[in-house]
Amino acid sequence: MDNYLLNEIDFREKNFMEVFNEVQSYVAENFSKLITEQETDKTKEQLKNTVKKYLTDRKLKAEELSLEETIEKLYSEMTEFSVLNAYLDSDRTDIEEININAWNDIKVSFSNGTTKSVEHFSGPRHCENIVRRVLNKESKMILDKSRPIVRGHLSNKIRITVMGDGVVDKSIGLAASIRIVNPKSLDKSDFVQKGTATEEIISTLETLFRNGVSMCITGETGCGKTTIMSHLLKQVPYKKRIFTIEEDVREFDLVVYDENGNVLNNVVHTCTRKSEDPSKVIDQEKLLETAMTMNPDVICVAEMKGKESFAAQEAANTGHTVITTTHANGCRETYSRMEDLCRLKVNLDSTTLRETLMKAFPIVAFVEKYEDNVRRITEITECVWDEEGHSKIVTLYEYEIESSTKDEQGHIHYSGRFVKKNNISNRLIKLLLKRGVQKSEMCFLEKGDNQ
């Protein structure tokens, strides 16, 4: 039926969810394959035409929507993710997290630091149906009474945790946290401009890592650890082989091509595999064991959070350059965190284990996201050893807050500076010289940043 004739129809109007329930029942009973089949342009058109015919035959549409708007919204509800569609768009880079606290409470956190409430579901059942569809369509995860908590990935760069009936009240539908991991491709000037660090601080980390010094980037979730690690990995010379290990899905994309599509660098990307069959599980520890047999120069363990931590320090202590992240409250606390993780694998005395970890990861950088939404490297430390074998942790750089103010909108603004506390140790200077780094290139030895 053409648009002219449609405009002549006097449509009855109903609440959208009433229209949805009616149309969904009809389609499910008569054309179920259109919903369950893999979506193609053809099935999409067939489903929309079916819905359109149903509505026009019954002279029905949703309140405050045109017929075409009703069809589009019905299609979204039946095959897509309803109110979540706009925020799960893979092309968007401005969203960091979607938190569903209840069917009527959805908060979206944006990369500019703002958080706002958005359109919510129509009820608990609607909330459950859509989130189950997200889990099943994207990764075949099942949420039911026997498995009321589900954790996993929807696709590259999207992590999800869902809690359902039995863990939260049935009246809220369910609770979920959907985190979009979107490491930005930033260069040194970007970090300086955004206030993450000074040029000298970034240069120090680049030079050390590029020349074989293992390190750990630490901080809370969302503070920017992965972005900094990704930048440092891109500084590795093309001739060196990089082996990355990630949990469940791959977020890094370090392969570099020339204009003809030829690969310039030397990268192997891997990720873990889960399975109901224990014999088919491939965890980070297994990937680390495999990496050691593949002649890597640089190993990246995206996040240390289990028994793979012991294998990571072994790799770092046997001539490999290792970079990793973990969750800790500061540089010094990072070694305690690593120690706890290693105990999941071995039972060494605390002194021996701590010394082993300090030798494996002499450099630790602590990253924080402040209330002004600026992610800053607030401290960098080096573990220094004297000739008698005694160690101490020395602060190389530190961010010092001088004052803070609050504007009329309640936003906090900080005034502070990055302060150089100490030079890197003579041991690291000698290592850099041995690797061919000229003293003229070690700008971080010539001066201190106090900005």
Image (cartoon, grey):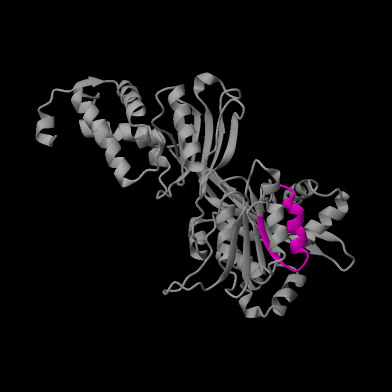
Which image quadrant: the C terminus? bottom right
Q: Is residue 207 left or right of residue 344?
A: left
Splitting the image into 4 quarters, where does residue 62 fall? top left
Residue 64 within the magenta-colored segment of the rendering:
no
Any part of residue 396 in sight: no
The residue at the point 53 percent across, 36 percent down is 177
Any part of residue 369 in sight: yes
Q: Is residue 244 left or right of residue 119?
A: right
Is residue 340 depicted above or below 392 in this figure? above
Splitting the image into 4 quarters, where does residue 302 fall? bottom right
Which image quadrant: the N terminus? top left
The residue at the point 50 percent across, 24 percent down is 173
Where is residue 116 shown, x and y percent of the image?
43, 35
Where is residue 365 shown, x and y percent of the image?
66, 56
Is residue 3 depicted above or below 342 in this figure? above
Where is residue 5 shown, x and y percent of the image?
10, 31
The residue at the point 49 percent across, 56 percent down is 184
State the count of labels: 0
The residue at the point 43 percent across, 37 percent down is 409
Report the magenta residues as a range: 305-324
